[in-house]
Image (spheres, helix red, strand yellow):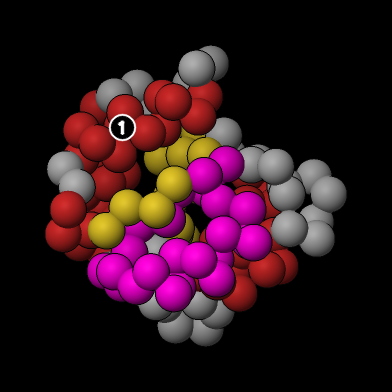
Amino acid sequence: MKKKILVVEDDLSLSKILCIDLEKHDFEAIAAYDGKEGLEKTISEMPDVVLLDIIMPVMDGLKYLEEKKFIKNIKDIPVIILSNLSSPVLEEESKDLNFSDYLIKSDWKLADVIKKIHEKID
């Protein structure tokens, strides 16, 4: 059975690229375009890993993490943050919110994301 990856990203092009690449690597990819939709899909789909942007409409990634940590069924699902924000303060603040890795979008390649996902599920 394929592992499920939820991509919570408001940039439609990036979301599509990530989903296509994940499917090429034999994952089931699910997309959500804001934190609220991401939280709903995390609950309904029970993904194995969540790729999460921080700056999004409706509900941002930090609020998503705050909400997720109080929902028993999903609180332990690994989250890899993919963000344009390179803020040590933000990274430090978000450490209390239970995420696995923090990748700056301009610093990573798709292969890096796949490697991080495998680290969480293998």
Residue 89 part of the magenta-drawn span: yes
From the viewer's perspective, tell me whether residue 119 is left or right of residue 95.
left
The amino acid type, in three-letter code, at marker 1 is: Ile
Q: Position of residue 3 (x, y in %)?
A: 50, 26
Q: How many numbered badges does the structure rendering display?
A: 1
Q: Residue at x 68, y 68 (%)?
A: 66
Q: Nearer the viewer, residue 22 or 88?
A: 88
Q: Position of residue 33 (x, y in %)?
A: 42, 67
Give above or below for 28 relative to 104.
above
From the viewer's perspective, tell me whether residue 86 is left or right of residue 76.
left
Q: Residue at x 60, y 68 (%)?
A: 64
Q: Nearer the viewer, residue 67 or 107?
A: 107
From the viewer's perspective, tell me whether residue 114 is left or right of residue 119.
left
Tell me the quarter of the picture where residue 96 sits.
bottom right
Q: Position of residue 41 (x, y in %)?
A: 60, 55
Q: Is residue 35 visible?
A: no
Q: Nearer the viewer, residue 13 or 72?
A: 72
Tell me the quarter of the picture where residue 21 sits.
top left
Tell me the quarter of the picture where residue 67 sits.
bottom right
Region rendered in magenta: 78-100
Q: Residue at x 80, y 45 (%)?
A: 73
Residues packed near mark 1 inside 10 Å, few (<14), some (14 to 19) or many (20 plus): some
Q: Residue at x 72, y 47 (%)?
A: 74
Q: Position of residue 11 (x, y in %)?
A: 27, 69
Give above or below for 30 relative to 2.
below
Q: Which residue is mark 1?
A: 114
Q: Nearer the viewer, residue 86 or 16?
A: 86
Give above or below for 26 relative to 114.
above
Q: Residue furthest bottom?
A: 58
